[in-house]
Image: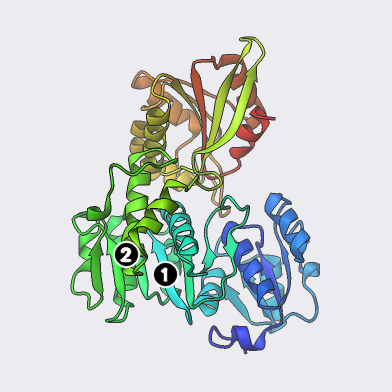
């Protein structure tokens, strides 16, 4: 039977259930570079699945047990799919070994000098920043990042001993990693459908830091009250990233949150003994990743005879939403911020309702889409809708409107936006389609 300890050696044919996900697609590319034959499925086609096809992955556009080749030796599945997925049930009934994404990732990277970037927010940007730094330093790392970098990929195949990966705490998945250098950007109550409260999140991070060997290093904000408990009693070295905040650094990505991300990357680069000038140059040339305050283009306003800039961002947690709006105001201090937002999951929207309203109230105008259902979670026990959030925002004096479809939101923006506005599309679902359509 395949285990995480012999995957590279014994597997030449793998099938991936949910291959279109950002992490799964990076892992598919990793498998390809290791010489494996890769197939996979997802519920719909996307830019990612189209690109995977062009790179040699056989991709099916829906989940169906008939998708599975007869000769596969391993099935890898995303933690986002339910246990009753028909492909997963089929491979298990056939006795085919299965691994979750996080277990498969650990199997591929734990024998490297592993740098893992964790935290509630900022993981993707910090990982991408550090990847740029390490590349410029000639360290040739293998990289897995939770977005598309400016080269259009979420994976880099390196030939050195170094691997740099984004490490998510959801369902304790990062516990499958054995990092030599662990970065913790921050800790908040997130993934509320799995973690009951902040203490549960901290417990998961404590288990992660406890995994480090005495020779390991943790980079974190040692004064952050949410982080301090997970650093207590460690044998590993703890490096505070706060002294590495450089207010004079000229960044192309706006916002205090990105200065903190840069500080994390700088502290890690210092641990790796990278020259400071190399780090500074890489950060000043860093231009972001896909869906992280990504400039999509201008939307022509026919009725106004002018244009409005459109940005797209993955922000869905209240802290991310607030930081992204603040970054937009920093870059465009003279424009009105028009946010088009899609709440992500009923559980998150319900538990973090008041924080979400507080964050969205920082915008001048808010247009809301229906709550995005993920992981087969439905309204069920959660007495929450986007209309509820709209009412809360009206109560605090925010100009807000709800529309039931993405097409209706596109029309609303075109009818309402002015040439002195900035359109900021945010959410972790399919709301990015609004930004795409507006800038066609």
Q: Is residue 315 above or below residue 234?
A: above
Q: Quadrant of residue 439?
A: top right
Q: Residue at x 61, y 53 (%)?
A: 151
Residue depth check, mark 2 versus mark 1: number of the one nearer the observer: 2
Q: Which mark is residue 270?
A: 2
Mark 1 closeness class: few <14, some 14–19, many ≥20 residues within 10 Å: many
Residue 150: image location, x then y, percent: 58, 50
Residue under circle 1? 115
Is residue 33 or residue 158 the one in the foreground?
158
Left or right: where 227 falls relative to 60: left
Left or right: where 49 falls relative to 229: right
Q: Residue at x 68, y 82 (%)?
A: 96
* Quadrant housing the N terminus: bottom right
Residue 170: image location, x then y, percent: 44, 61
Q: Spatial distance from mark 2 to mark 1, Cα to Cα?
A: 13 Å
Q: Residue at x 32, y 66 (%)?
A: 205
Left or right: where 373 falls relative to 31: left
């Amino acid at each position: 039977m395949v285990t995480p300890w012999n995957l590279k050696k014994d597997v030449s044919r793998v099938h991936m259930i949910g291959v279109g996900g950002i992490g799964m697609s990076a892992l598919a590319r990793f498998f390809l570079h290791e010489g494996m034959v890769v197939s996979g499925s997802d519920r719909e086609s996307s830019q990612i699945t189209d690109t995977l096809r062009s790179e040699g992955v056989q991709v099916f556009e829906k989940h169906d047990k008939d998708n599975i080749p007869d000769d596969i030796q391993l099935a890898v599945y995303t933690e986002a799919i339910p246990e009753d997925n028909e492909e997963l049930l089929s491979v298990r009934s056939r006795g085919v070994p299965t691994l979750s994404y996080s277990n498969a990732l650990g199997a591929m990277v734990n024998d490297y000098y592993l740098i893992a970037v964790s935290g509630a927010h900022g993981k993707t940007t910090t990982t991408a920043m550090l990847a740029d730094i390490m590349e410029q330093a000639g360290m040739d790392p293998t990289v897995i990042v939770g977005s598309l970098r400016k080269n259009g990929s979420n994976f880099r195949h390196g030939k050195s001993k170094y691997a740099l990966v984004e490490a998510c705490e959801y369902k304790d998945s990062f516990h499958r990693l054995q990092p030599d250098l662990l970065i913790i950007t921050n800790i908040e109550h997130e993934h509320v459908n799995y973690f009951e409260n902040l203490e549960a999140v901290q417990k998961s991070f404590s288990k992660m830091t406890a995994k480090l060997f005495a020779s390991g290093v943790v980079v974190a904000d040692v004064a952050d009250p949410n982080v301090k408990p997970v650093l207590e009693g460690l044998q590993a070295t703890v490096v505070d990233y706060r002294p590495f905040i450089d207010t004079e650094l000229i960044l192309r990505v706006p916002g205090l949150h990105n200065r903190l991300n840069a500080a994390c990357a700088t502290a890690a680069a210092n641990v790796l003994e990278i020259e400071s000038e190399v780090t500074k140059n890489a950060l000043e040339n860093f231009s972001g990743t896909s869906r992280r305050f990504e400039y999509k283009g201008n939307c022509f306003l026919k009725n106004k005879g002018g244009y409005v800039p459109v940005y797209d961002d993955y922000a869905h947690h209240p802290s991310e939403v607030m930081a992204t709006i603040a970054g937009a105001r920093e870059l465009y201090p003279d424009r009105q911020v028009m946010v088009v937002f899609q709440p992500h999951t009923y559980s998150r929207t319900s538990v973090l309702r008041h924080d979400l309203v507080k964050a969205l109230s920082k915008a001048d105008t808010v247009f809301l889409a229906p709550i995005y259902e993920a992981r087969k979670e439905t309204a069920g026990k959660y007495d929450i809708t986007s209309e509820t959030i709209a009412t809360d925002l009206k109560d605090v004096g925010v100009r807000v409107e709800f529309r039931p479809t993405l097409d209706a939101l596109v029309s609303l923006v075109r009818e309402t936006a002015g040439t002195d506005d900035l359109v900021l599309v945010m959410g972790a679902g399919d709301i990015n389609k609004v930004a795409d359509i507006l800038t066609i």
